[in-house]
Amino acid sequence: MNLSAKSTSHPLPLLELTQMANAIRVLSMDIVEKAQSGHPGMPMGMADVATVLFRNFLKFSPNDSKWLDRDRFVLSAGHGSALLYSLLYLTGYPDMHIEDLKAFRTWGSKTAGHPEYNHAEGIETTTGPLGQGLANAVGMALAQKLEASELGAEISDHKIYTIVGDGCLMEGISHEAISLAGHLKLNNLIVLFDDNGISIDGPTSLSVSDNQQARFKASGWAVDEIDGHNFEDIFVALTRAQNSDKPVMIACKTQIAKGSPNKAGTSAVHGSPLGAAEIQAVRTNLSWRLPPFEIPQDILKSWRDIAEKNALVYEAWQKRWAALPKAQKEEITRRRNGDLPSGFEKAFQSLTQKFITEKTSVASRQSSQMVLDEISTVIPELLGGSADLTGSNNTQGKSMKAVTPQDFSGRYIHYGVREHAMGAMMNGIALHGGFIPYGGTFLVFVDYLKPALRLSALMGIRVIYVMTHDSIGLGEDGPTHQPIEQLASLRAVPNLHVFRPCDAVEVAESWSTAIALKSTPSVLTLTRQKLPLLRTEETENLTAKGGYILRSCEGAPQVILIATGSEVEIAVSVHETLRTKGVPSHVVSMPCTTLFDEQDATYKKSVLGAGLRVAIEAASPLGWDKYVGEEGLIFGMTTFGASAPYQDLYRHFGFTQENITAKILEKLGE
């Protein structure tokens, strides 16, 4: 059953299509020219492809940009943002006005240099870092398959379209993304390759001679090659793609800055305005007589009529939606709004009680597994995965069935050794809606997915990164696998919460807090080695405060021991030893520095106190000076680790009760 009604009959109205495409060309070049900054070449070159896609195939509603069953359009080649902004204006998105196009790349504008999620309706993701949008699109396509397996094609039957350029396909992330998409047979994904042969430095032949079509075929894709300026070719290829049993790549042979008589086909128009003289030459060449930012009413009407045709599809879907049982609609709406089920708090409370009662003392990666075993049955939208480290990351809840090319009813994704794609795909899954994605790897490999994680934070979306083997405590695997600088680098990312829990209770609290954060990604850093249970009484969620007093003394403390993760156990031991020597101290567990920084000054002062502050973390000391001050002590890692049992490493690098106590007493002059 065809629910989308996206095709048209022959013959194609070539004059109308040409005029509509030229509207994109002149708007795009005018947008960039007014800003004196931007990339006009790609929008002008892909104008014909975009026109056929939006006019004849894309299912969307400008008045309901969050429509569950809309097709997604991802501009992976985000430098061509003028193309997207022109399309949003031309198709009638109510919050995209001609004044917004004129404000391109200016302070406070919706029309940023590269498309930014939530800046304007119709922008599905933030793109610009090349290849990220392609992997986002793969994540969206996977999310649609999962959604359709739950809701059926009557409610979820949309496709994901993405425009990629040579740069997207040069980036290594593209290999990971297209490989997994081919393996999963994501036939709802259509990639439009802007094959113009030009990059910033000049012709792509300077640096690449890949056969991209053969590459996609080798990864299990269906591939088409067309003239990207022939409307008939474009239409036929997109028509064929609708019923493919594989993901589809359409290589569109285009000319960058098509329509520019003197600069088309050159790198000069990749990232620079055309200039006033060439702008006028383009207008003459295209017989475009109106001044900048003016579109003839008949051409604008052709664009606005697309939304009216789509309105019939939208209304038919709304009737199917209305026919659903009330409870099902409420559940779908809850998940789409990012709200959590009412019973999730009780699940965490029960877990905390269980950990305390049973004195659960395991590696935090294992207590994380225990958490997932419970909450995966309570939060149906939780969607897990790992980059081929499931048994090490402990990321598959016991009720989670794996997703396969034949069965999309599972809730666990085997990403393979593809950290780059995993991070960006999780972004796409979160952006698609209906799921809370989390994925695991070793903390040291966070550098592989850092660009995607950074975009998670920039977009403000709920993605959870489970990073195990979080310090030199992983031991024998050695310095290649022992993260030293990663915690500091992650804490430097704005709008990112980094959790390093010290025991099973803090693990449960970290998960509870991370899942409740709608507009912030989180990183959970977990140990390989066993941790004792340090939280022995039921309390409120103290991890949500970022830092708190775990062990206290009578009266004012002389020393405040601040630690995270596995080093909190050491701080407690130091605390006990100092007590025997008549030195009162507090132990502050600080599982999330960002959340602690968000507390009011009174609370922070009450936790940190006025004594000698000592920070203990088996990682880079960078950043701890803000908590301990100039007179404080920091026990951290200033070199790489080594391959040895973790107990030996902790002794060698000074993370022992004896060494830390001695240095504190020396500092105190005792």
Image: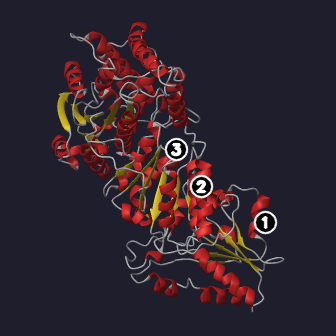
Residue type at mark 2 is: Phe
Q: Residue at x 39, y 66 (%)?
A: 392
Q: Earlier in the sequence, mark 2 or mark 3?
A: 2
SS label for mark 1: helix
Q: Earlier in the sequence, mark 3 or mark 1?
A: 3
**Residue 57 visible in image:** yes
In the picture as drawn, the residue positioned furthest to the right comes out as 555
Residues tagged 2 and 3 counted as in contact (Cβ below 8 A): no
Q: Earlier in the sequence, mark 2 or mark 1?
A: 2
Q: Looking at the rendering, in which quadrant would you find the N terminus?
A: top left
In the rendered view, would you say 273 is above or below 378? Answer: above
Whole-angstrom CA distance, mark 3 to mark 1, is 32 Å
Residue 454 position, x and y percent, is: 48, 51
SS label for mark 2: helix
Residue 174 position, x and y percent, is: 30, 47
> Neighbour class for label 1 at 10 Å: few (<14), some, many (≥20)?
few
In the rendered view, would you say 353 is above or below 621? Answer: above
Figure disc tally:
3
Q: Residue at x 26, y 42 (%)?
A: 406
In the picture as drawn, the residue positioned furthest to the top comes out as 298
| Residue where numbered disc 1 is placed | 606
Q: Looking at the rendering, in which quadrant would you find the C terminus?
A: bottom right
Residue type at mark 1 is: Ser
Front residue of 442 and 273: 442
Residue type at mark 3 is: Ile
> Neighbour class for label 3 at 10 Å: few (<14), some, many (≥20)?
many
> Where is residue 302, by image quadrant?
top left
**Residue 293 visible in image:** no
| Residue where numbered disc 3 is placed | 461
Residue 46 position, x and y percent, is: 30, 28
| Residue where numbered disc 2 is placed | 348
Residue 230 position, x and y percent, is: 21, 21
